[in-house]
Image (cartoon, rainbow, N blue to C red):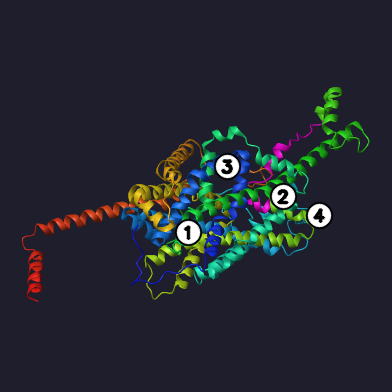
């Protein structure tokens, strides 16, 4: 791919050591998605069934792309735009697309850190504010919305988000979220003041501390009643769900989102490496640790899901027991949770009319497992409830939300680096402007854009960005990346570069993935997604206290204008790919036609000037 110039250019920063680089890559890959996105996808797609397409996508798409990005960044020692311009000027738009995706992901990703800060600030209260319902306005009882749902749900949807009934009702800016969002961006900026020097020091804490906290939560979660039901739900696949193309799409995009490929951050991080470094080992290590962390984090999540479902199931049965006991005038403790099914079967056989007249609630543990948590609130709702059950809940809450902040912050490092490195490498900003000011401007623009997430409808907009920015654009960018390196630059040249860096040429597995399997899978998933989206109207879950089935979420279709914004979010980040290619082709055509006209010009003195110069040289 061409050698790095050692003279005449500013010396590129380097990592202090290999551990620092690996921790930064792992910290970038292992983020909030491992805690709230991966378990959420497992939940909505039939538990263990999601693991099958996820692992297939990891082996045949995620790891090959991760290896490819680390290799080209390390060889060329540039950011995403510089790398793709070096491979081919026609591919310059791929780097711009990566930078835009990285910027857009960073905007909504840091919003989660704002929510985490809000919960962290409230974790110092005793009792925790999400452990009990507040009083109503008349101080005569508890808040009705809170009583209908749960204190944890109420604190998330009403106290934190102050959510509106749908996306069309914007609501006002929530001042507490604006302050938290500004604080989150200030922390990100402080960590980036000295570039990779300060980032490299921060990852020693942000990349390792979460594992300690996860282990503590795992031990506690496994002791809760009903934890086994949650784990069985996680590891039992629903094979029918695999027929849904959306499962395969979300598995692929989860790999990209989790490994953070196609966003430019990994290319930027590997560009600070020495050229002679085993990037194959790095790619496998980072990929395996990332996926193992997702599974590791899912165990306490699902153990707590099982606990929540069992608690709700027992409460449902106890309500039925009370109705049966009062109607048939049984003595207390005659019907228990353990013998409820036997009693119900007996009474249905002896007094079916009376039992039917009681209109008992149908209690199904599986239904409660399916409805225990949803969406971005999974980590906040499920883990917040787990914290309440623990002795010294304030300490546990502080530990947990500091862990979440660490996870998110280490991932934000990569998102911002994916924007800053291309800007610095391309010298888009004059040298007299300090890098600290450039970083401040980018963080400020991102903060102002992210204010949309602090509206009453902010969570709905968050879901829009999360669902569409992190899926289609990443698929398209990945497809162009792998096609550009293997078929434009060439597999043979790329193999020689890897041999130069690692001392070994890529084996048949990597070559098969890069040349056939990965591009084909990416293309199939992309086409399947377009077909599915064309056949269905995109919808979203809303929190509406006026809904007749509340506290269940009400599913509504997106309005037409919101659907137009969704299309823009899918198209705008990647529109630079064809536009830049078209611009370069037009420029090339103009230069060629100009050169042709010069050759045919009878008044051109180029030949005479060369000849005169040769005569001077001979005389000398």
Q: Position of 524 compared to 163: left or right?
A: left
Residue 556: image tag: 3
Residue 133 visible in rendering: no
User: Looking at the image, which residue is at 41% across and 65% down?
Assistant: 423
Q: Which circle, 1 or 3, is nearer the viewer?
A: 1
User: Looking at the image, which residue is at 47% across and 59% down?
Assistant: 265
Q: Quadrant of the C terminus?
A: bottom left
Q: Quadrant of the N terminus?
A: bottom left
Q: Position of 267 compared to 141: left or right?
A: left
Q: Earlier in the sequence, mark 3 or mark 2?
A: 2
Q: CA distance from mark 2 to mark 1?
A: 43 Å
Question: Dot 2: within a 10 Å radius of its alpha carbon, few (fewer than 14), some, or many (20 or more) residues?
Answer: some
- Residue beneath label 1, please? 265
Q: Which circle, 1 or 4, is nearer the viewer?
A: 1
Q: Earlier in the sequence, mark 2 or mark 4?
A: 4
Question: Dot 1: within a 10 Å radius of its alpha carbon, few (fewer than 14), some, or many (20 or more) residues?
Answer: many
Q: Earlier in the sequence, mark 2 or mark 1?
A: 2
The stretch in magenta equals 358-381
Residue pushed farthest front? 503
Q: Which circle, 4 or 3, is nearer the viewer?
A: 3
Nearest the viewer among 593 and 273 is: 273
Residue 558 magenta: no
360 over 458 or under it: above or below: above
Quadrant of the rendered image containing residue 361: top right
Question: Dot 4: within a 10 Å radius of its alpha carbon, few (fewer than 14), some, or many (20 or more) residues?
Answer: few
Residue 145: image tag: 2
534 over 385 or under it: above or below: above
User: Looking at the image, which residue is at 60% across and 50% down?
Assistant: 292
- CB within 8 Å, label 2 to label 4: no
Residue pushed farthest left? 602
Q: Which circle, 2 or 4, is nearer the viewer?
A: 2
């Amino acid at each position: 791919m061409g050698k790095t110039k050692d003279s005449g250019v500013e010396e590129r920063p380097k990592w202090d050591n290999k551990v620092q680089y690996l921790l930064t890559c792992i910290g970038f890959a292992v983020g909030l998605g491992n805690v709230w996105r991966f378990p959420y996808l497992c939940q909505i797609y039939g538990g263990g069934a999601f693991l099958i397409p996820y692992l297939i996508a990891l082996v045949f798409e995620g790891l090959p792309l991760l290896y490819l990005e680390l290799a080209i960044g390390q060889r060329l020692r540039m950011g995403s735009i510089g790398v793709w311009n070096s491979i081919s000027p026609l591919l310059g738009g791929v780097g711009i697309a990566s930078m835009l995706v990285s910027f857009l992901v960073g905007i909504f990703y840091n919003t989660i850190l704002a929510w985490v800060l809000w919960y962290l600030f409230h974790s110092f209260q005793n009792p925790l504010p999400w452990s009990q319902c507040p009083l109503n306005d008349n101080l005569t009882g508890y808040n009705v919305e809170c009583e209908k749902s749960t204190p944890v749900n109420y604190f998330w949807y009403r106290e934190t988000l102050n959510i509106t009934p749908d996306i069309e009702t914007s609501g006002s800016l929530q001042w507490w979220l604006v302050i938290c969002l500004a604080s989150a961006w200030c922390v990100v900026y402080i960590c980036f003041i000295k570039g990779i020097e300060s980032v490299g020091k921060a990852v020693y804490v942000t990349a390792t501390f979460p594992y300690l906290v996860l282990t503590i939560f795992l031990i506690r979660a496994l002791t809760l009643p009903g934890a086994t039901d949650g784990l069985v739900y996680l590891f039992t696949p629903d094979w029918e769900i695999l027929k849904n193309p959306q499962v395969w799409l979300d598995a692929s995009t989860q790999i990209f989102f989790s490994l953070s490929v196609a966003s430019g951050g990994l290319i930027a991080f590997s560009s600070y490496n020495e050229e002679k470094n085993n990037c194959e080992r790095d790619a496998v290590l980072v990929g395996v640790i990332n996926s193992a962390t997702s599974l590791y984090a899912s165990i306490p999540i699902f153990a707590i899901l099982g606990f929540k479902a069992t608690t709700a199931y027992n409460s449902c049965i106890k309500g039925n027991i009370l109705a049966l006991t009062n109607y048939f005038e049984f003595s207390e403790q005659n019907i228990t949770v353990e013998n409820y099914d036997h009693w119900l079967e007996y009474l249905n056989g002896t007094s079916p009319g009376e039992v039917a007249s009681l209109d008992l609630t149908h209690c199904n543990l599986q239904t409660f497992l399916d409805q225990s948590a949803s969406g971005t609130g999974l980590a906040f709702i499920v883990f917040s409830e787990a914290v309440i059950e623990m002795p010294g809940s304030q300490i546990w809450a502080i530990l947990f939300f500091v862990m979440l902040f660490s996870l998110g912050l280490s991932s934000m490092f990569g998102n911002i680096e994916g924007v800053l490195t291309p800007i610095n490498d391309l010298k888009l900003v004059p040298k007299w402007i300090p890098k600290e000011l450039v970083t401040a401007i980018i963080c400020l623009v991102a903060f102002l854009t992210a204010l949309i997430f602090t509206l009453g409808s902010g969570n709905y907009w968050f879901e829009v960005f999360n669902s569409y920015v992190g899926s289609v654009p990443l698929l398209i960018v990945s497809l162009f990346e792998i096609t550009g390196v293997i078929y434009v630059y060439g597999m043979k040249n790329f193999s020689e570069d890897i041999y130069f860096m690692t001392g070994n040429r890529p084996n048949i597995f990597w070559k098969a993935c890069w040349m056939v399997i990965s591009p084909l899978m990416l293309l199939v998933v992309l086409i399947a997604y377009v077909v599915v989206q064309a056949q269905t109207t995109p919808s979203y879950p809303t929190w509406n206290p006026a809904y007749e089935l509340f506290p269940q979420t009400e599913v509504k279709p997106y309005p037409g204008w919101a659907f137009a914004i969704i299309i823009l979010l899918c198209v705008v980040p990647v529109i630079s790919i064809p536009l830049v290619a078209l611009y370069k082709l037009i420029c090339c055509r103009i230069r060629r036609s100009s050169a042709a006209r010069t050759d045919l010009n009878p008044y051109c003195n180029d030949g005479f000037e060369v000849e005169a110069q040769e005569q001077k040289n001979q005389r000398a």
